[in-house]
Image (cartoon, rainbow, N blue to C red):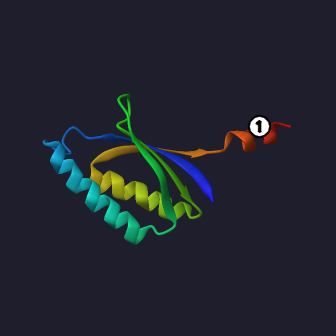
Amino acid sequence: MATYVMLSRFSPEAFRDPREFLEIVQRVTAEINIRCPNVTWKSSHATLGRFDVVDIVESSDLRQLELATMIIRGHGHSITETLQATPWKDFLASLA
């Protein structure tokens, strides 16, 4: 199973009140759970930098990961960037 880092930035037009954001999160989460069963969220973090959210996910199905990012973009009104991540020890071992 591959690990990915998803970086998301909210559109300024996505919501006016933070409580509206909670509704968006519930809707996006429900759709991803139904349509992308091979994508597993390992952790999510709110950040104060260039991106608003950093998610660590695992998936054995790249197509479902692509669909999950499109759901986030469409329903979550976000811009996303997804990076494949290699565990540090595996990366170092590949250099030997």
Asked whether 40 or 71 is in front, the reply is: 40
Tag 1: amino acid: Leu
Tell me the SS state at disc 1.
helix
Image coords of residue 14 (percent x, y): 21, 45
Asked whether 67 or 45 is in front, the reply is: 45
Tell me the quarter of the picture where residue 94 sits: top right
Quadrant containing the C terminus in the rendered view: top right
Q: How many marks?
A: 1
Image coords of residue 27 (percent x, y): 26, 61
Tell me the quarter of the picture where residue 48 sits: top left
Quadrant containing the N terminus in the rendered view: bottom right
Image coords of residue 72 (percent x, y): 35, 54
Q: Residue at x 38, y 28 (%)?
A: 49
Instruction: Find disc 1 in the rendering and name its residue.
Output: 92
Q: Residue at x 37, y 34 (%)?
A: 47
Above or below residue 31? Residue 83 is above
Q: Residue at x 58, y 51 (%)?
A: 3
Q: Residue at x 33, y 51 (%)?
A: 73
Residue positioned most to the left = 16
Is 79 left or right of 11, judged from the image as shown? right
Residue positioned most to the top = 49
Above or below residue 86? Residue 71 is below
Is 44 left or right of 25, judged from the image as shown? right
Tell me the quarter of the picture where residue 16 sits: top left
Is 78 left or right of 58, judged from the image as shown? left
Image coords of residue 83 (percent x, y): 54, 44
